[in-house]
Amino acid sequence: MSAHTPISKRPLRRTAPDNGSGNAPVEVMIVDDSLTVRTVFKRMVESDQAMSIVGTASSAERAIAQLKTTHADVILLDLEMPGMGGLDALPEILKTAKDAQVLVVSSLTQDGAEHTMAALSMGAADTMLKPRPGGFNDEYREQLLDKIKALGSHEGESTDAVPAKAAAKEPAKRKVAPAKKRPELLAIGASTGGIHALNLLLRDLPTSFDLPILITQHLPASFIPVFARQIEVACGRKTIIAEEGTVITPGEIAVAPGHGHMTLRRSGDRLITKTSSAPARSGCMPSVDPMLESIADVCGGQALAIILSGMGRDGAQGAEVLHKNGGVVFAQDADTSAVWGMPGAVTKAGLTSLVGTPEELREAMIALAGPARVGATTWK
């Protein structure tokens, strides 16, 4: 896996010309070696007055050259191109484009999944599958534009999909009384921008941190096996895809399958996963809400949930149930989130005890998972 790059504080986006709606348009650059794809994406983007095309490039080298003089909020990046290629160019693109978000447009091949997961771990915010011929339809257009809007939102727009500086003021970080009981497990929910945050959160965990870790990450089903392997390599911990009847084991990581929600049941002293395909309120598959609701049911207050970067509100209802049962909820802060939708929803609902960077969350979760000591200060 490629080396991790730190999440930097994103600077304020510059003020772009008003598009008539009171908000500056989202400025988009398209990087793809296919003229047909560039043309189709350009037409899709320009069909929405809330967006504008500021440049197109047929190679990564040309994109980097353009970005030195051209501002972009969102970059649509093809990874499989002649020359430098999108994956090799990604670190330079992120460095040159500064506050831009990168949306990877990935092929359906196995290599495409591998490369896309590497790009997401390096700092690309989200992915969109490149459809087969004839697949560039209205449904695809709407999904693409929704992702671009979430990643490129300017100040004053919907707070369900806001970047760092457009977010509501976060509560101050605070220390409270120690937790009465050690958590049985750690559950993590993430979506857009969450994979990079996950790598920062879980890397360098001490061997003493033996809580089982459950992860629900919004990804296409075909990407889940690659995601699980990359998490295992990055964290140095056995990582499995949770299927029906999987036993949750201390020190191991279980990932929700792409075809269903990961939920829990208790059998004696064992926690066992169940897979549900029932529609979730969020519309996501897999969804964070069913995971957290089932954890609240079987673990009560002995659980820690962390909500990382992602658009929408998935995880908010499950976190509320867990919180009511005495569980602990952390959330990623706005400045380090690609989109502060999911973590913002639980924060603004007053469910979080800690809002911080992935590194700060890691330190706090290690402290919380340590042996309970009378008079110790931790996070609750």
Image (spheres, rainbow, N blue to C red):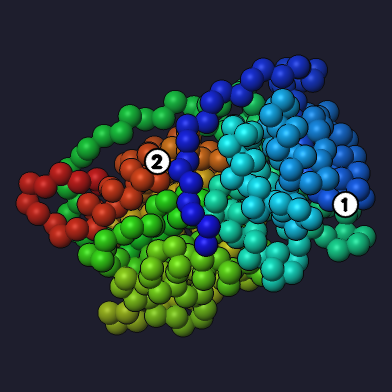
Q: Nearer the viewer, residue 91 or 261?
A: 91
> Is residue 157 found left or right of 239 in the rendered image?
right
Residue at the spot of label 2: 357
Task: Where is residue 213? Give x, y as percent.
Answer: 38, 65
Instruction: Tell me if residue 54 comes above or below residue 110 in the rendering.
Output: above
Q: Nearer the viewer, residue 349 or 239?
A: 239
Residue 92 has which mark? none
Residue at the spot of label 1: 34
Location of residue 219 (image quadrant):
bottom right
Instruction: Tell me if residue 266 comes above or below residue 354 in the rendering.
Output: below
Instruction: Tell me if residue 235 comes above or below residue 344 in the rendering.
Output: below
Q: Nearer the viewer, residue 153 or 259?
A: 153
> Is residue 227 found left or right of 149 in the rendered image?
left
Location of residue 372 (image quadrant):
bottom left
Task: Where is residue 378? Give x, y as percent.
Answer: 20, 46
Residue displayed at 75% across by 39% down: 63
Name the amino acid, label 2: Thr
Upstream in sequence: badge 1 or badge 2:
1
